[in-house]
Image (cartoon, grey):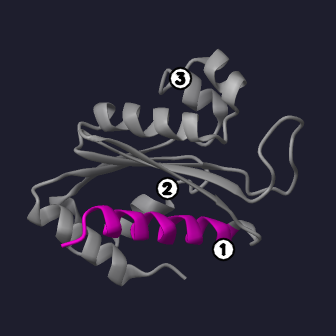
């Protein structure tokens, strides 16, 4: 279950700092944005989200180089970082988070194992990569990704 109290705290902390927030989501398919926007007043901080579920959306829409994705894998800290940095500029936000992962049921040859997630937080001061391995079903994994990101944002922007 997603912790909405954490979402409220994160939004409050960002608002007090005058910072805006956005997301670029693959594995979570917009769940982070939906969670944030379920908090009344979220529009004071949250500007929007890109849902780039298919790899082609990452290359064609975000303009992440195909060779870069082939080198590191679509589920990698490198691709998560590019997603967050590109999203930060494209959404014109101060803070952008990203999510890419393999929820299964299978692992393709040379790809990340089932349960692997890479997330990133990008700001003007740099970025923070987060890698997790989950043994959960698809939707539990997506929820835990959102909770993990809320934890990270709470830690980065604690009051």
Disc ID at residue 25: none
Q: Which secondary structure lies at badge 1?
A: helix
In 3D space, how far apart are the residues under numbered discs 1 and 3 (Cα atoms)? 28 Å
User: What span is colored magenta in the figure?
Assistant: 139-159
**Position of residue 63 in the picture relative to residue 157 (left or right):** right
The stretch drawn in magenta includes residue 1:
no
Residue wearing tag 3: 64
Q: Quadrant of the C terminus?
A: bottom left
Q: Name the residue rendered at 33%, 49% in the picture.
A: 22
Earlier along the polypeptide chain: callout 1 or callout 2? 2
Image quadrant in which the N terminus is located? bottom right
Mark 1 and mark 3 residues within 8 Å of each other at the beta carbon: no
**Above or below: residue 39 compared with residue 23:** below
The residue tagged 1 is 140
The residue identified by callout 2 is 30
| Quarter residue 45 falls in | bottom left
């Amino acid at each position: 279950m997603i912790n909405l109290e954490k979402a409220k705290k994160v939004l409050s902390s960002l608002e007090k700092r005058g910072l805006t927030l956005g997301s670029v989501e693959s594995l979570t398919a917009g769940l982070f944005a939906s969670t944030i926007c379920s908090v009344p007043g979220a529009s004071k901080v949250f500007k929007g989200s890109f849902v780039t579920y298919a790899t082609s959306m990452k290359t064609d829409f975000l303009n992440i180089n195909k060779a870069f994705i082939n080198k590191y894998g679509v589920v990698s800290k490198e691709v998560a970082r590019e997603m967050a940095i590109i999203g930060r500029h494209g959404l014109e936000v101060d803070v952008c988070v990203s999510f890419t992962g393999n929820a299964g049921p299978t692992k393709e040859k040379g790809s990340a194992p089932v349960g692997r997630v890479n997330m990133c937080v990008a700001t003007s001061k740099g970025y923070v990569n987060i890698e997790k391995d989950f043994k959960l079903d698809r939707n539990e994994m997506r929820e835990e990704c959102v909770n993990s990101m809320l934890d990270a944002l709470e830690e980065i922007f604690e009051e």
